[in-house]
Amino acid sequence: MTLVEVTHARASEPAKEVLGTDCFCGNADEAAAAILARVATRQGGYGCFCNVHVVVTALHDERLRRSLDDAWLCFPDGAPVAWMQRRQGEPTARRTAGPDLLPALVGLGQPHGLRHFLLGSTDEVCDRLCLRLRSAFPQALVVGSLSPRVGDGSRLDEELVDRIASKAPDIVWCSFGAPKQELWMRVHHRALAPALLLGVGAAFDFNAGTKRRAPAAMQALGLEWLFRFASEPHRLGGRYLRTNTEFIVRATNELYGSATH
């Protein structure tokens, strides 16, 4: 079967707003199907994976707000975001995490010859990730990787775009971290069409094995952020304290307001 035949039934992507950001509603399998369907259309665009930090930061950063609004789709890459969707009447909403979807889509793309490009992180991480993906998925086509130093995404980097486009990727996985990757994708996605760009943050490190991911039990309880905080307190402590607190306050106010009207 062709990729179009596999994904033709996926006509739309249900979404529910969380603090101003429309996020996909569904599980990881449905998210993967939506991405494959988008790739099959050859329309390009970009997808964002939104955790609490991204959703809250977008409330104060107009450039990030535009980047999320202009995305083809935003996925709830954070258990509290999906929890908020469920509390607002979307019982099927589940966390759809970039670190899970990256290997899943590389595997699912094998029968269809999907071409993947890794962009961001470091040379060492990309090399290790390539080795792991090719070991796990022998028929996968990881056609290239680059770990460039990029600016704030305000200008088109023509040389970098040409190098990526020369590999004719179907999916470009971007790992610059938020909000840099969202800003970069918004500026560059048209020049890289028909490739679909996906900003997955630390997914490269987790899948390459250069950073430990939270145990499955902590992920299931929505506590992956706590594990990451304990692993990198100096880098993530201030961010989590600020954005998690604001998310709790705003979510409580929004849900309480909804319950009293």
Image (tube, rainbow, N blue to C red):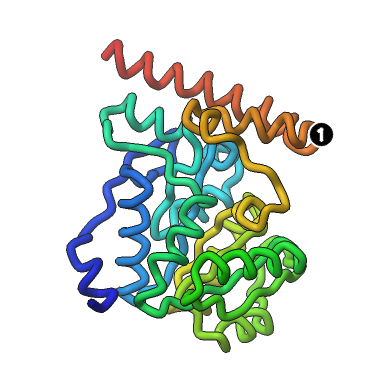
Q: Is residue 230 left or right of residue 75?
A: right
Asked whether 239 or 170 is in front, the reply is 170
Residue 94 rendering spot, x and y as whole percentages: 37, 38
Outermost bottom residue: 166
Quick one: label 1, few (<14), some, or many (20+) residues within 10 Å? Answer: few
Q: Amino acid at mark 1?
A: His
Q: Secondary structure at mark 1?
A: helix
Could you tell me residue 130's position as x and y percent?
Answer: 63, 69
Screen quadrant of the C terminus: top left
Residue 57 picture location, percent across and down:
59, 39
Q: Residue at x 63, y 50 (%)?
A: 206
- Residue farthest toward the top in the current orientation of the protein: 260
Residue in view at x 66 percent, y 71 percent: 155
**Between residues 17 and 197, which one lies in front from this camera angle?**
197
Residue 138 spot, x, y in % from top left: 50, 74
Can you tell which quarter of the image residue 241 is in?
top right
- Identity of the residue furthest to the right in this view: 234
| Residue located at (33% from left, 39% from top) | 16
The residue at which mark 1 appears reads as 234
Relative side of 205 to 117, left or right? right
